[in-house]
Amino acid sequence: MAAVGASSGGEVELAATEARLQALLDPYRDRLEAFEIYGVPMLRRPGAKAHDWFAGVNRGNGVVRFSFLPMHAHPELLEGLSPAVLKRKTGASLFTFKAVDDATVEELAALLSRGFDVYWPGGAISG
């Protein structure tokens, strides 16, 4: 499948990219609670403090932001990611995308799985 959002970076493409990244969080929604920090939607363990979140997706200036806190404290989670995905890491706990292809989605899904085990040991996801 071609990269979603590759043509123009326009609204339709960003919406498709956001939808694909949001879908990556779906397996975790039954175990985690939704909340906002500084107006940004995130997922966290039920009852966790504000700065103890797992992941979230939101829009920014012409990009979709994929926030993933476990990689901040556990950079070893990034081992094995492709150079293309690592290039999209724009902060200690942030990736930014205009488009995502199937390979990127697969890498991010695996990263989330590894990160969830670190974030919530014993908090296995259902499914």
Image (cartoon, rainbow, N blue to C red):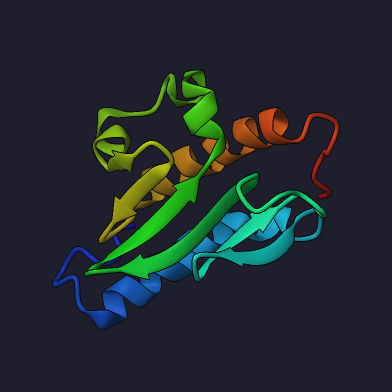
Residue 77 versus residue 86 in the image, above or below = above
The image shows residue 55 at horizontal and vertical percentages of: 57, 50
Q: Is residue 58 left or right of residue 47?
A: left
Find residue 84 and report its image quarter. Answer: top left
Residue 83 versus residue 96 in the image, above or below = above
Find residue 122 and report its image quarter. Answer: top right
Residue sitting at the far bottom: 12
Residue sitting at the far left: 8
Q: Residue at x 43, y 53 (%)?
A: 66
Q: Is residue 29 left or right of residue 114?
A: right
Q: Residue at x 34, y 57 (%)?
A: 1
Q: Along the line of sight, which residue is nearer the eye, 102 or 56?
A: 56
Find residue 46 and report its image quarter. Answer: bottom right
The image shows residue 100 at horizontal and vertical percentages of: 33, 55
Q: Residue at x 63, y 48 (%)?
A: 53
Q: Is residue 49 left or right of residue 107?
A: right
Residue 10 versus residue 67 in the image, above or below = below
Residue 39 versus residue 49 in the image, above or below = below
Q: Residue at x 25, y 61 (%)?
A: 98
The image shows residue 90 at horizontal and vertical percentages of: 28, 42
